[in-house]
Structure formats: C-alpha cells, structure tokens
Image: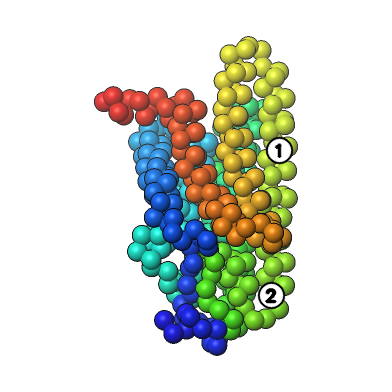
Amino acid sequence: MSASNGTDFTNPSTFILQGIPGLEAAHVWISIPFCAVYIITILGNFIILFIVKMDSSLHEPMYYFLCMLAVTDLVLSTSTLPTMLSNFWFNSREISFNGCLAQLYFVHCFTATESGIFVAMALDRYVAICHPLRYSTILTNSITAKIGLAVVLRGGMLVLPYPLLARQWPYCRTNIIPYTHCEHIDVVRLACADIRISSYYGLFVLFCRIGLDLPFIAISYIHILRAIFCLPTKDARLKSFGTCSSHLCLILAFYIPGLFSSLSQRFGHNLPLHLQVLLANLYLLVPPMLNPIIYGVRTKQIRDRLIRLFTH
C-alpha cells in the first residue's frame, strides 16, 4: 500500500479505484440500484439465450444476432460491475496493473463489438423488410456466421492497441484512478509521458463506432421505413414499425450516452467529475439491462415462448 499513497514510483503494480469522487459517503446507497441493474441484466440475457436455444423456430439470423448481443452484454456488465460492487461494499479499491489493462480492454472491446452487432441487426432487418423473398438466400447460416466473426474480430483488433500503448507508458504521478473501473483515457492520463498517440487513437476508435457504424444504421433504417410505409395493410405496417422502433430505441440508448461519455472525458473539464463517472456507468449498465427487456417485450416470438415457459 506504500505505493498507493505516494507519487514517487514508476509503473505501479496496482492502481487504486476511487469510485465516484465526491460521493464516497453514498457508495452503499448507490450500490443498491447498480446491483439491481446487474441482476436484471444477468437474468434477462440468460433467459434470451435459453429461449433461443430451446425453440428451434428461433434459429434464424435475427435471433443469432440477438444471442450475440446477449453474450456481449453479459461480458460487458461482468467486466465492470463486480469491481464496482466490491469497491462500494467492501472498500476493495486495489486492482493490479495487468488486471486494469485487461478490464479496459474488455470494456472497449465489447463496446465496439456491440456497436458492430447493431450494424448487423440493422442489415438483418433491412433484408427482412426490403427483400423478404430473398431473405433466406441472402442471410444464410454461413453468411450469418461470417458476419458475426467479422464483428467480433473487428472489436478485438480495433481496441487491441489500447492496452499495448498503455503498457509502454511510464507511470510516475499517482496510481489513483478517479473512477469506478479502469477507463482507457483516465488510465493513460496518469502516465508521465506524451500520450497524444493514445488520445488520438481513442478518438479514431470513437469515430469508427459513431462516425461509421451509426450512419450505416441510419441509412438502413431510412430504407426500412420507406419499405414499411409502402406495405399494403395497416396491420403489416404497424407490426414492422413496432419491431423497428424497439431496435431504434436500443440503438439510441447505446450511442447517445456513449458519445456524451467519451466526449466529456476528453473535453468536459468544466463538468463535475462525479457526473462524468455516473454518465459513464449509466452508459455501460443501462443498455445491457434494456436489451433483453425490450426485445423480450417487443418481439412476439420471444414473448410467446416466454409466456409458454412460465405458464408451463
């Protein structure tokens, strides 16, 4: 613990996670909604995986992508929530240097993967609604598997320079991270070196997620909405629009807080630190909780299978 209190050290073996600066006295109370969100996330995503596995009629590209989303949400939540709750409940703030780098890699890797999954799901809905007769020939199981593999590889390779660059910087200022978990930009800011490469690469990754993925999703849904309004019956339009609206709500809940969180970390110097930390936590915790709830409620096949499961 001697290294944790001073500033005369290089490359510390541990970092100290401060939690939510300024709200330390309320950590126990803050942990209650955090824990509830985590439990709902675990249960909801496991139920989605179980239902899709058990019902052979759901073995289609849309539900394969939904399962990928559920697994991603489980990993994303589990990579941060146990650390937060351990900090809040037991005042366990230490995290090893390698563990910190692993945590920031998993957080950003699966965030980028989730963004790619939303792109894949937008493509799936575009083909299903705009080219329904060719859906089974365009999105075969082989093509779906290749898309899923590409999404995972892109997320893993895109974020790989984060820990590699962070590892090479010398750390001689402090090892106290004013955060609930290891966030990339907050870790490299502790380095006593020129970290512009890490900062610029972080902006490049943000551009890939927001500047490339989001326009592709927007273009897909513009074509989808055009096709929906051209459907012959009102019931068909309402059914298709209901499915797409739930997708759009989830996408907005994922990208908008993420964009504000990333920008506030870099440029929001006048924003109180505890607000930055809370915003980052909401961005990581709320979408994984909402995804299974909204898909379970708005997707008829999953909702019917869930009702049959509990009534049985």
Where does the image place residue 7, in percent across and percent down from the top left? Answer: 55, 84
Q: Quadrant of residue 143?
A: top right
Q: SS class of the residue under badge 2?
A: loop
Q: Which label's residue is closer to the chain start, 1 or 2?
A: 2
Furthest residue in direction left, as rendered: 312
The residue located at (61%, 24%) in the rendering is: 241
56 relative position to 242: left or right: left
Q: Residue at x 60, y 60 (%)?
A: 273
Q: How many marks?
A: 2
Image position of 114 with respect to 24: above or below: above
Q: Secondary structure at mark 1?
A: helix
Residue 151 lies, with reference to residue 235, above or below; the image says below
Q: Which mark is residue 195?
A: 2
Task: From the image, state whether disc 1 or disc 2 is nearer to you.
Answer: 2
**Would you name the residue on which mark 1 appears?**
218
Amino acid on which disc 2 is placed: Ile
Question: Residue 41 versus residue 176: which sits nearer the camera?
Answer: 176
